[in-house]
Image: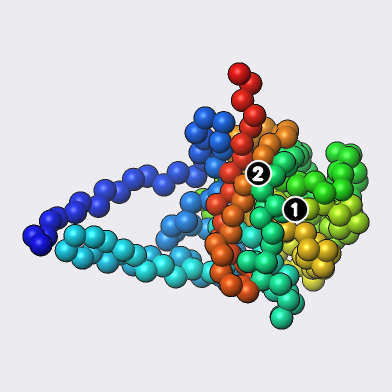
Amino acid sequence: MESFKVTLETFPISYGMKKSGNIIDISLSIHKSMITYPGYSHPKIKHKWWSTTADSEITLSSHTGTHVTSPRHLYMGTRGVDSYPLKQLVGPCRVVNFSRVRKVITMDDLRSVRIKQGERILAKTSNSKRGFRRFYGDYVTIDGDAADFLAKKKISLFGIDALSVAKNDEADLRAYTSLLKKNIVIVEGLNLEGVSAGKYTLVVLPLSFRSLDGAPARAVLMKKSSS
């Protein structure tokens, strides 16, 4: 078979919200120069070109970009990311605007929005406004008491626009432990820029790695059409 030349075009990397109709992509794009949590490796992508086709070798952390974290992230021998039932990852959710919070989302902040049992809660903070071109060590997330509150409320899923639910170098890991012990799905690295507070349908599907501590995910919101 006669070979042919393939031209690889370079497109600008999009850091903002991607929307198609009533579907909003709230995932971070994965690329070599993307931000990562301190100490985690950047993605490595090696393209291979054959006579008629191409493929790529990809090396990346299980907590790259938008990702789902499982109990195995903290507790060896526990549930992996592939163990979450799909009905927990897909369904109604609520985007809550905490953009005025400067440091951490507190229990009082959560009480003010009347969180209910079984809800999927996505926390939008000032992290989304300043973007994801570089890592900011003072990112906003939840504190331990807030995590305990969510665990007692028995929510189904908690997502946030930060690469970690715990503060950088924070000794208090309840932001993880309190949620994971209750099998509450944690979604980190969401891009909620341009997303209004309100009710949506969430679809977040981590790659189905067997028994892994986490996995990159594609996450989208769907808003009911007004027509």
Observer-nearest residue: 218 or 98?
Answer: 218
Q: Residue 224: image x %, image y %?
A: 64, 29
Q: Quadrant of residue 175?
A: bottom right
Q: Which residue is outermost to the left?
A: 2
Indicate the quadrant containing the C terminus: top left, top right, bottom left or bottom right: top right
Q: Residues within 10 Å of mark 1 (few under 14, many from 20)?
A: many
Q: Residue at x 52, y 35 (%)?
A: 19
Is residue 27 visible to the viewer in this orientation of the structure?
yes
The total number of labels drawn is 2
Q: Residue 91: image x %, image y %?
A: 70, 44
Observer-nearest residue: 160 or 83?
Answer: 83
User: As shown in the figure, which amino acid type bears the numbered disc 2?
Assistant: Leu
Q: Which residue is mark 2?
A: 202
User: Alpha carbon of mark 2 to alpha carbon of mark 1: how far?
Assistant: 10 Å
Is residue 126 visible to the viewer in this orientation of the structure?
no
Q: Residue 177: image x %, image y %?
A: 80, 68
Q: Secondary structure at mark 1?
A: strand
User: As shown in the figure, which amino acid type bears the numbered disc 1?
Assistant: Leu
Indicate the quadrant containing the N terminus: top left, top right, bottom left or bottom right: bottom left
Marked residue nearer the N-terminal end (2 or 1)? 1
Observer-nearest residue: 164 or 76?
Answer: 76
Q: Secondary structure at mark 2?
A: strand
Q: Residues within 10 Å of mark 2 (few under 14, many from 20)?
A: many
Q: Residue at x 51, y 38 (%)?
A: 18
Observer-nearest residue: 117 or 45?
Answer: 117
Q: Residue at x 58, y 72 (%)?
A: 210
Q: Which residue is mark 1?
A: 157
Task: Kindly check if marks 2 and 1 are in contact, taking CB atoms under 8 A apart as contact.
Answer: yes
Residue 188 circle label: none
